[in-house]
Amino acid sequence: MGAVENSRLEGRVVVEPGAVVRNSVVRGPAVVGGGAVVEGSHIGPYTSVGSKAAVRDSAVEYSVLMEGAVLRALRGSRSPLSADTPASP
């Protein structure tokens, strides 16, 4: 399991080795891929955060964030997001 700091994991949640979840809530079912960073965010349910993705100050559910995706200050996404998706206000 990756690092979970000052966060709450609810239900079936996988935090893969190398991932960091900090100051966040992750509701399962959810997966946070290796090397991903989730900080100050609400994730899930039914969400997959791809490896090496970064989610900061955001809320996403029912979504697939592809490898390398970067989200900042995004609320309410329910769709696939990739590294090429502009995802900040």
Image (tube, grey):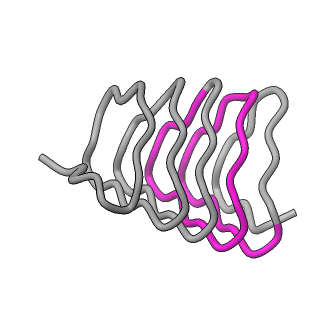
At which x and y percent is residue 52?
57, 71
Q: Is residue 12 above or below residue 67?
A: above
Horizontal relation, residue 10 to residue 26: left or right: right
Determine the residue located farthest toward the left in the rendered image. Answer: 89
Q: Is residue 28 above or below residue 37?
A: above
Which residue: 34% across, 50% down? 57
Give the number of callouts: 0
Most foreground residue, 62 or 26: 62
At which x and y percent is residue 24?
55, 47
Tell me where residue 17 sits by quadrant. Answer: bottom right
Most foreground residue, 2 or 80: 80
Q: Is residue 2 above or below residue 47?
A: below
Which residue: 30% across, 60% down? 84
Residue 45 on the magenta span: no
Most foreground residue, 20 or 29: 29
Q: Look at the image and tell me in which quarter the N terminus lies.
A: bottom right
At which x and y percent is residue 8?
69, 41
At which x and y percent is residue 67?
55, 62
Horizontal relation, residue 40 to residue 12: left or right: left
Residue 23 on the magenta span: yes
Tell me where residue 51 sits by quadrant. Answer: bottom right
Residue range highlighted in magenta: 17-44
Which residue: 51% across, 64% down? 53
